[in-house]
Amino acid sequence: MKIFSVLTMLLFLSSCAIATGDTFTDGPTLLDPIAGLYETAVVERGAVIDTDMLFGMVRIISEPLYFEAEGFVFYEFVLDVGDEFRTGDVLAVLNTERVQDHLENLEANLTRLRRFHALEVERLLLAVDLLEMNYADTLRRSAETFDQDAADEAERIWESIEWARLNLTHARENQAQAISDALTSIRYHQSALMGTELTAPFDGVVTGLMSVLPGWPISAGQTIMYAARNGQTPFIEFVDDTTVWLERWLEENTRVHAQIGDRVYSIAHIVHTPEQRGDYARQVGTLRIPVRFAFTDISDEYPPVGAAVTIFRHLIHEEDVLRVPRQSLFSETPNGPHSVDIIVDGARMNVFVEVIAIGITYVAIESGIQEGDVVYVRP
């Protein structure tokens, strides 16, 4: 009975194996080995860099431009940022409508004043002529008739003539003074209009416009816009409340580079002398000195003025060192020990390495692996 049961069990297992196409001695189907989740990279020589960054703008040395007229309101800018101009070109204008209207009134008043004084002088001259004619007639009558009354009358007429002549003189003097005052006022307003157009004092380009709207009052000497003379070299400038911190930031490591869009530029920090600092403070009225960087490798055109710039300071910069991707490094603590997984004879092996520096994307290796080794890289 027991023999029959064992035979029955063997036949059942045999039929199951035939049905599935497998044998009971085959192992289970496994997933890909864990190494398949990793990429690999070849140990090579190259640069290892780590940076931090700040932001600046492409600038050129600009000069403030302003109106010389006083008592006007703003009208419009004729040019925009980036527009080039020639000496004498009009860059901006003030609203002169009110002054023009007043000037027209002054000129009209001058015309009326001249007409009035001309009529007044003509009236006084006529009065003098009539008195003189009356005097001559009375004097002749007195001489012919030896009439004392006529003689006294002639004397009174002569006094009237003297008063009339004096009035005529005063009228002419008053006329001259009134016309002179009117002309002075007209010339003053005409001269004021001469400063209501801001003309270019040199050949150059507009680099900045102040936030001024039409109708805003403008004072003489108030900066309206900035312009740069032709031939100026663009630079990168960074100014804000962290200027002092920034200069200390640069003193620690002055190796920097700039990026504008997809292009990388070599730049150098422009160090200001004490004399330059003093000149800047006197010109601008502030002790905040701009931090500037010069382009050092421009072979074609400079980037446009006003372009935003990212400035990178090199915290780590190792050239021609043995390096591996940062994601291939395993570390128990930030200070080590460090290790990488390499392929040796087709097998994965973990080896300890001595690290020089850890950059943004690469790690500089002193020892533990060799150029050409293949390391695993975590995704």
Image (tube, rainbow, N blue to C red):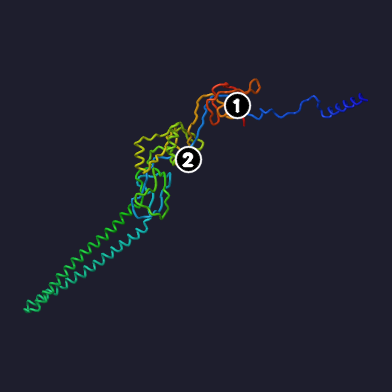
Q: Position of residue 26 (x, y in %)?
A: 78, 25
Between 142 and 338, the one lying in front of the other is 338
Direction from residue 267 to residue 141 in the image, left or right? left
Task: Check the picture and name the quadrant holding the C terminus.
Answer: top right
Image height of 315 relative to 104, above or below: above
Q: Residue at x 39, y 50 (%)?
A: 92
Q: Which mark is residue 113?
A: none
Direction from residue 254 to residue 69 in the image, left or right? left
Look at mark 2 in the image and give the residue it sits on. Answer: 308
Task: Check the picture and name the quadrant holding the N terminus.
Answer: top right
The amino acid sitting under disc 1 is Ala
Note whether residue 361 is visible: yes
Q: Position of residue 282 (x, y in %)?
A: 34, 42
The amino acid sitting under disc 2 is Ala
Quarter of the image holding residue 9?
Answer: top right
Q: Which mark is residue 41?
A: 1
Q: Residues within 10 Å of mark 2 (few under 14, many from 20)?
A: some
> Which is more N-terminal, label 2 or label 1?
1
Direction from residue 123 to residue 272 in the image, left or right? right
Between 262 and 230, the one lying in front of the other is 262
Quarter of the image holding residue 333?
Answer: top right
